[in-house]
Image (cartoon, coloured by chain):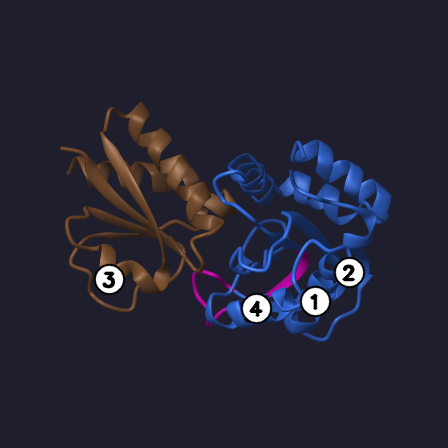
Amino acid sequence: MAKTVIVSCGTAIATSTVAAKAIEEACKAAGIDVVTKQCKAAEIKNFVDGADLIVTTSQVRFDPGIPVINGLAFLTGIGKDKVIEEIIATLKG
Amino acid sequence: MVRLQESFIFVDLEAQDSDEVIAALAGSLFEAGSVAEGYGKAAIERERIHATGLPTRPFPIAFPHADSEGVHQSALAVAIHKTPVVFRNMADPDEELAVELVIMLANKSPEEQIETLRSLAELFGDPDKLSELRYLKREAKIVEWLKRELAL
């Protein structure tokens, strides 16, 4: 079954689009079947059901019950490879 | 298609705070007809809730933007500050960043602009390129450079 990754940022218009695309490509290369769902930070709650992982560039202020990884690296380029590794390890785990 | 022209570029901008920077950039887009009058206000409000400062190297940047509502035509506007202006860190709003370069994004359709967004993210992640852009100093050069680097 495909893994579902929630990708969120402030307005779901720029950051999450870049991050979602990068995650899809990295997972494909790693042989992981993945579906990304983009949303605004405030909407994460509505998407958590059935999701495996949250990648966000803002803070998550509640316990979503699934892993949360900071995706700022997709914009700053700093530590991007490490974040991709972490995402893949989490989804494989 | 992303619009970029000399009137959208501010070199040595003197601004007291991030509101002023955002207002100046959005004002130039409004004058050219790329965004509605309220876009600047929306971006300022958005910045308060979801900061857009990034701890990039060799200096922090910010890329303020609002919802696509009010965007008539996708466009980029750029400010290079005379002295750094405080923006808050996207990942940690309690952290203040002394931002030297601001790229405002008016995005009509994220899906259509994916290539531009990715080129921008690549630029943000490249310290040498950011430095190059920071010190170009002339509006025409900046437009030409960005069009080439972002394949606009």
Q: Is residue B152 above or below residue B42?
A: above
Spatial CA distance of label 2 from label 4 is 16 Å
Viewer-nearest of discs 3 and 2: 2
- Horizontal placement of B99 versus B14: left or right? left
Q: Amino acid at mark 4?
A: Ala
- Horizontal placement of A58 versus B67: left or right? left
Spatial CA distance of label 3 from label 4 is 24 Å
The hue used for chain B is blue
Q: Do the CB atoms of the residues marked 3 and 2 lie less than 8 Å apart?
A: no
Q: Is residue A79 visible?
A: no
Residue A14 within the magenta-colored segment of the rendering: no
Residue B93 within the magenta-colored segment of the rendering: yes
Secondary-structure class at tag 1: helix
In the rendered image, the quadrant that contains the C terminus of chain B is top right
In percent of width and height, residue A34 lies at 25, 34
| Labels 1 and 4 share a subunit | yes
For disc 3, the marked residue is A45
At horizontal 70% and vertical 67% (from top left) the residue drawn is B21
Instruction: Chain letter for mark 2, please.
Output: B
Q: Is residue A13 visible?
A: yes
Secondary-structure class at tag 2: helix
Secondary-structure class at tag 3: helix
Q: Which mark is residue B31?
A: 2
Q: Amino acid at mark 2?
A: Glu
